[in-house]
Amino acid sequence: MIFQCGDLERALRTPELMPDARAHAENCQECRYQIYLWTEISRLAPQLHEEWESAQLWPRIRADLAAQPPQKRNPQPWRWVLAVAACVALAILLVSPRQSPTASRELLTDAALADVQQAETAYARSIANLAAAAGPELQGSASPLAGAYREKLTLLDSAIDRLKSTAAQNPYNTYLRTELASLFSEKRKTLEEWMNDAKRK
Amino acid sequence: MRSANKIRLLISLATMAAVTSAAPAPPREEVSRDFQKTVPLAAGRSLRVEHSQGSVAIHTHAKAEVEVHAAIKCSSERATDARAICDRIQVFVDETGSGVSVRTDVPNGNSFPWLHSFSWSVDIDIAMPDTAPLDLRNQFGSVSVTDLHATANIVDSNGRVSFTGGRGRQRIETSFGDVELVRNDGDVTIVNSNGRVTASDVTGALDVRDNFGEVKITNIGKRLDVNAGNGAVTVAGVGGPAAISDSFGKVTVRDAKSDVNVRNANGELEITAVTGTADLRTTFGAIRFSRVGKGATVHAENSQVTGDTVDGPVTIDTTFGAIDLHGVKGGARLTAQNGSIRASDIGGEVYAKTSFGGVTIEDVAQPITVENSNGSITVRAKAANQCRPISLSTTFGPIKVSLPSGQGYDVGARTSFGQISTGPPITITGQAGNESISGKIAGGGCQLKLVDQNGNIDILD
């Protein structure tokens, strides 16, 4: 089925529909949020369950219901006014020339992040190529210089892993991305230096 | 009525759908929140700061209180989510038994699992009493501390640390970030890894440990201890003894008012204007020293050594590199293997030993001993008031010695497969042949011993 947001409520009551709902939520933040809330409530609710003796509860409820006059369901035109107003407001909000949020120095925009990630991928590819070229000689050499390069590369790899894991949790943070780029650059420079040194020898 | 409502609803929904489908993808929303809190900090109490993923700027004031200002910025796909993230970030400013604690609690990957992407940054600015000690920890963010007149212990990682105008004993540690320290009245310890260290105008002692980063030190009042690796070390102006170790980087020291001790490997040394002694070691890198007050000792391997203007004795040993020494008031003991030796204007006794390289000694008025093999020897002795013996030996190279006029020598010279010639008149007292001669020059009195194999010997005026 082609799952839509309107199907979510039904899916939450029908376990067979949940795989479709989850697939849809992958690209729909609103549904993702609703599923998260539902899951959390389902998880927490059993822990909150309490029972107590209250023999008079049902008789009291029944008596109260019997005493209440039947409710009139009056049409409420203000609801429609509100709905239309909300639609108009929403439409205005969506079609009005919208200023893109001012990008701060501290946090990246989507476009900037895409550029950065592209650059990181390119860096990683270039580094992988360099490492493949430099690797055998670097790993095989017993010279103190090779030892120093190996130590530095190990240090850089460990720092890159640590920073990557932090940046994964805070991906738009400019500082983390800049640091990561600088470490990639440092690693590439180190490999290039080693290759130049090795060539000179 | 019902159908009218339906029509209205339909029109509304159609409008919404059309508008929504025409609209571009929602841009990223960013929300900011400011946090401010001021708490008292009594004299003698300290400030502790723990932060992460943002900068920390500390400056001081004369008030007995800590003012904390945090600029929190969050972004997500929706403003409400960004706001929720900003609300989740907590800055705790607590009064504790030891003083004031400032701590930030930031989200982690599990904080908002329904969000595909969210980000934040928290920059903290703190004004604190200038006399309160500081204990600061940060990671993934820079730190700056200005005008703190008390002890500080700063530990950062992946962040630059800048410390200016301090007083007291300071300890600064970071990694993958530069450290810049300007002016501190007191001792300082700096530990870094993969980052530059720059320190200037420290009245006390300075200890620096750094690996894979350049170290630049200027104007240190007392002792300097640098333990570096894989980066250049440059020092200008040290009041106390300086001990520097490094590898794979050039070490430069100038204007040291006491002793200088440098241990390097695979890197050059350049040492200038040292009031005390210079003890210099390296491998695979040239050594240059100049204007050393109380003598220099150099141990090197595969290194060329050049030195001048030393007001004391000089000892140099190296391999596979030449020695060039000029203007020494004390004696010189020079050993090279596979390298030439040149020494001139030496005030004390000269001993030179090498192989596979020529030896030239000039303007020396003290005893001269040269032991060479497979290389020439050229000596020009200066006039002296007393007897200054000269002993030169080599193989497969000529010996040329110029003697000061009027100086008396007892000559003993012999060679093989070569000739002996004398410029100054010589009175033969023993053997006299092409390959061996014994006699006196200017009445004798001082030993002149010349031994060669496969080379000529020339005794010149």
Image: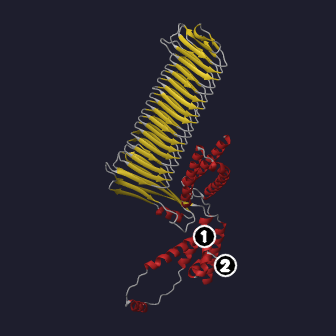
Q: Residue at x 66, y 70 (%)?
A: B18
Q: Which residue is mark 2?
A: A1
B185 with respect to B268 (left or right): left
Q: Which residue is mark 1?
A: A28
B134 with respect to B454 (left or right): left
Which residue appears farthest toward the front when viewing the image? B430
Quadrant in the picture for residue B435: top right
Q: Nearer the viewer, residue B339 or B369?
A: B369
Number of other residues with Cα within 10 Å of mark 1, as a class: few under 14, some 14 to 19, many 20 or more: some
The kind of secondary structure element at disc 2 is loop
Is residue A143 at all visible to an observer of this figure?
A: yes
A119 with respect to B72 (left or right): right
Quadrant in the picture for residue B184: top left
Looking at the image, tell me whether mark 2 or mark 1 is earlier in sequence order: 2
In the rendered image, residues at marks 2 and 1 fall on the same chain = yes
Give the chain of mark 2.
A
Q: Amino acid at mark 1?
A: Cys
